[in-house]
Image (cartoon, grey):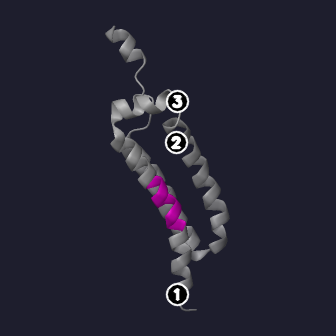
Amino acid sequence: MNILAALFEVMDKEPPLLQVWILFLTLGIGGFLLCRYRRWMLAVVLPLLFFFISIHLMELHDPFVGPAIVSEAGQSYVTQSYLVMALAVSLPFLGIAMSRKRLP
């Protein structure tokens, strides 16, 4: 029975939480820097962000994989994933807001 449990583990196929944080913070900070100096880069950054977010959300909301992630990694994995994805989306907009406050 333990062999079957090892075959059906989910978290060995999912990225660790640290990797999720690094990926989305890198995209968010990169978007912040790009959008701070070139506002039109938001049109490049957001589709890239939404691509990676949609991939991660498909895993979290899958009817079979999602509950297995919660049972193996805990609700903290899902909560922190949502937190870092929201942060990554908000950072480019913060960059645009900060660029408007600069004096010419």
Q: Nearer the viewer, mark 2 or mark 1?
A: 2
* Relative side of 17 to 58, left or right: left
Residue 90 in picture, x, y percent from top left: 51, 64
Q: Main secondary structure of the magenta part?
A: helix
Q: Residue at x 67, y 64 (%)?
A: 43
Q: Circle 1 is placed at which residue position?
A: 102
Magenta includes 86? yes
Q: Residue at x 40, y 22 (%)?
A: 9
Please state which amino acid type lies under the numbered disc 2.
His
Percent position of residue 33, x then y: 52, 69
Q: Do the numbered discs 1 and 3 sit on residues whose CB atoms are within 8 Å?
A: no
Element assignment for label 2? helix
Residue position marked by numbered label 3 in the rendering: 63
**Kind of residue indicated by mark 3:** Pro
**Per the image, is 62 magenta?**
no
On screen, 13 above or below 5? below
Residue 69: x %, y % from top left: 41, 33
Q: Residue at x 51, y 57 (%)?
A: 27
Q: Which residue is mark 2?
A: 56
For the residues bearing labels 2 and 1, Cβ distance under 8 angstroms: no
- Which badge, 1 or 3, comes first in the chain's sequence? 3
